[in-house]
Amino acid sequence: MQHPKRLRAACAVLAAVCAISFAGSGNWVFADEASDLAQQLQQAQQDKEQAEKELEQAKETTEHEKQVSQQLKNNEQTLRNQISSLVGQISTKNEEIAQKQNEIAQKQAEIDQQQAEIDQRWDNFKERVAAMQVMQSGGTIAMLGQVTDLTSFLTFADNLQQISKYDNQVLEEMAAQKAILEELRTELEIQQTELETQKLNLENQKSQLDATKAALSQQIQQQDEKVSEASANEQAAKAEYEAAYAIWKQAQEEFDRLAQSNPGSEVIGDGTRMWPLPGYTSLSSYFGEDREIWPGYWDYGHGGVDIPAPAGTPIHVFQSGTVYSSYLSASYGNVVMVDHGNGLVSIYAHMTARLASVGQVVNVGDVIGTVGSTGQSSGNHLHFEMRQNGVRVNPLNYISPS
Ligand SMILES: [Zn+2]
């Protein structure tokens, strides 16, 4: 905040110096003061440009960090979807395994039932065979108490044989059926093992994804910190830029005020006037308009008129006079100011080239420069400004486009 103070001090000194300077003929004191201000302005200009560059960089950094953050968050969302899908698959697998276990249990119950029947039938069979053996050895006639004659004995023995044959056949069939059941159970068990392997596989995939997601979450947190940091830096850079811009604007205003002090020289010529850009009669901006000259910065009350024309178009001085200022301004660009006497000054700004030097006497129509877009300008045009006793006035009150 030292700059504005220094500038105010410089200007206070300047007012007295200017009065002395322009009372006489030379402008060397003016030049000394001007060079002081010019130096300050140059510094302010450099600071502003540096601050602007840093602000741009800070913005880019924030943008980049935000993009990285967004990418990470997209990846996280993808992982979340994958994990959610795996959880669903595992759940399905668990249901399938439970079903398979039920089927195995059922099959086992069938096998057990079959085995019980086999055991029962085997016991019966053994009893019958034992009885037959006893009969054949002939020592246990007593067992055949109900057999009263030979015929019935033979029938009985034959029946026993038939029964044992049948028993044998049934037992074989039952054993075969049991073997089939066991095979089916084994198959179910293999299927269950397969399902469990698949489930384990899914669970492994899920734990890997969980680990990746945890790492990613940490990365996202770090990235969000980077984004906050970048945003804070950007805010700081913006504040610095605004401060530098304010200092530069003030320095520029002080500098321009010095350059535009009306020296009050004599009237030269007969006062004939002409439009400075003959043939270019349409205006892109009128005197007194409010315009946004820089994003967020408004120029209230346009100081002159803007006349668009191609770069390099010759600019003619609108009335005879004496050039009292010709310099490169940060805002006006290449600017020439001509004193016409009686407190009237005309100003020609944003020129590509200045073709008139301080102290030069110019006659109406002389070319003093060419159209350009230097300084704070967004395209090729002539900023044509006029001052009466130091106050900006509408140039169209003095000369009409033609
Ligand atoms: Zn303008």
Image (tube, rainbow, N blue to C red):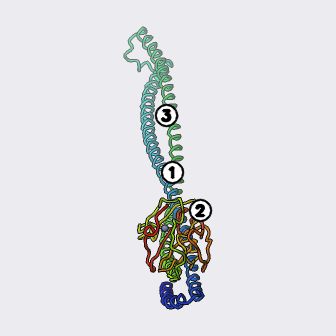
Q: Earlier in the sequence, mark 1 or mark 2?
A: 1
For label 1, the crowd category at 10 Å Cα-Cα, with few meaning under 14, some 14 to 19 and many 20 or more, is many
Amino acid type at mark 3: Arg
What percent of the width, then of the height, locates residue 369? 60, 69
Q: CA distance from mark 1 to mark 2?
A: 73 Å
Question: Foreground mark, 2 or 3?
Answer: 2
Residue 342 lies, with reference to residue 20, above or below; the image says above
Mark 2 residue element: loop
Amino acid type at mark 1: Lys
Residue lying farthest to the left in this orientation = 146
Question: Foreground mark, 3 or 1?
Answer: 1
Residue shown at the point (50%, 28%) measured from the top left? 180
- Residue where numbered disc 2 is placed: 313
For label 3, the crowd category at 10 Å Cα-Cα, with few meaning under 14, some 14 to 19 and many 20 or more, is many
- Residue where numbered disc 1 is placed: 206
| Residue 397 shows in the view | yes
Question: Foreground mark, 1 or 2?
Answer: 2
